Structure formats: C-alpha cells, structure tokens
Amino acid sequence: MKPIIAVLCPMPMEFEAVRKAFGKFGEPLETVFEEQKIDFENLDIILARSGVGKTLAAAKTQKLIQMYEPDHIFVCGVAGAIAPELNVFDVVVPNRIVHGDIRFGDVYNPTDVTESGLDLFQGKPSFSASAFLPERLNAPYQSGTLATIDSFAEEKEKILLEEKFNAVCIDMESAAVIQIATLWNIPVTVIRAISDNRHHTEGDFETNAPKACDIAAQALLTLLKKI
C-alpha cells in the first residue's frame, strides 16, 4: 500500500499553486474547502484547502486524519519574515513551531499546553515543553522557529516574537496543524515561502504572494520525494 500524504493549503492561491505543480487535476473528494486525491510517484496525495486561521486549520487537520489516516502531513504556502536576513521568496522549513500569541495573563505559554493538558502531549516525539517539533526531512532550505499568530504582525509584535521565541517567520495555521497531528503521532512538515520581509506592507504581500506560492509548491515536490 502506498503511503498516504495529506497536503494542507490554507488559501485558494496556495491550493491552486500546489495542484498546478503536480501538473494534473485530482479526483475531487470535496467541493467546499476543496479536497482532491492525486497520485504522485509512489504516494497517494490528499490535497486539501483549510481556509485561513488556526480554527479552520485545526478542524481540517482533524477531518483529514479521521477520514484518510495520513502517514505524514505537509503544510504548504507563504509566510511573513521576522528575521531580517530572510528575503522575499526564500523558503523556510521550520524545525520548531510555537503559538506566538497565546497568553495567560502576562505569561506566554509557547505551545498553548496548560498543565492540565500536558498528559495529552508528554512523551510524543513532536512535543517539547517549549514548542512543537516538525519533521524537516533533511530539507535543503532555511530552518528556525515559526510562530503562528491570528493576524498580520506589526513591528511591535515582530520584536516580541523575536525576543520571546527567536522566531524567524510567522503564519496563521501551522501551530494548530502540528498540535492536532501531535495528538495522533503523525509527523508534520511545514513549507513556507516568504511573501513579505521584515518591514512589509500589506501591498507587498498582495504583490509577492502568487510567486511565493509557486515557489513553496516546488519545494513541496522536492520534499515529497524524500518520503
């Protein structure tokens, strides 16, 4: 039996870039928040769109796990840079992922796991006390900490994420995906191409995101061959 690989793309442009990279239409599985089954070399790919944000990403991840029982989950799309050395269109495959905007009073809990929830995660290979740990698959791309937050970050938020977590980039879904996958002991690999640099404006994102989506999709094909 071929391995089942779920590929999760939050935005329509990310989903379409990955579908285009495969060079074929898949078998439609779902029309609302699309899902397609695609044969790729020795893998069965379930390509899915989640919608933007943690809640939709977590819900879609849970659905994919229960319906298709994937052996590995990929998140593919774009991210905003925090590290000044990251340039637009660089690819980051993080080795550490945190919830960047979870607080309890003035205290940050990087993974959003409270004391009462630790027993769900302790001992699982993708969990540490300070982060969730994705699988890089020896990726030939930049690494570092990705912080998932609920909105575009202004400079003051970027400074805080840099100071608290040494974050190099931000997105709005990956921490939720890997948190759900960790409960099921399913490895996750996150691929994010930089769509806007440290001093971005929203206009930069709109201009750069389509090309960044295509670059992330090509990186996905590279890493799928390592499964």
Image (cartoon, rainbow, N blue to C red):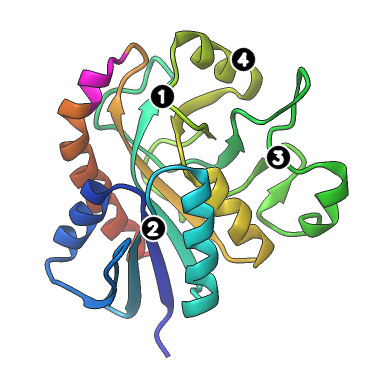
Q: Quadrant of the C terminus?
A: bottom left
186 w.r.t. 135: above or below: below
Residue kind at label 4, given as amino acid type: Glu
Residue drawn at 52 percent across, 58 percent down: 59
For the residues labelled 4 and 3, the Cα–Cα distance comes to 18 Å
The answer to which quarter of the image holds residue 182 is bottom right
Number of numbered discs present?
4
Query: Residue extending furthest bottom?
Result: 1
Residue with the mark numbered 3:
112
Q: Is residue 28 left or right of residue 127?
A: left
Residue with the mark numbered 4:
163
- Specify start and end residues of the magenta stretch as a single range: 200-205
10 Å crowding of disc 3: few (<14), some (14-19), many (20+)? many
Residue with the mark numbered 1:
152
Image spot of residue 67 (x, y percent): 49, 78
Image spot of residue 184 (x, y percent): 65, 67
Residue drawn at 68 percent across, 62 percent down: 183
Q: Earlier in the sequence, mark 1 or mark 2?
A: 2
Q: Earlier in the sequence, mark 4 or mark 3?
A: 3
Residue kind at label 1, given as amino acid type: Phe
Q: Is residue 184 left or right of residue 81?
A: right
Residue 227 showing in the rendered view: no
Q: Is residue 88 left or right of residue 63?
A: left
Q: Secondary structure at mark 1?
A: loop
Q: Earlier in the sequence, mark 4 or mark 1?
A: 1
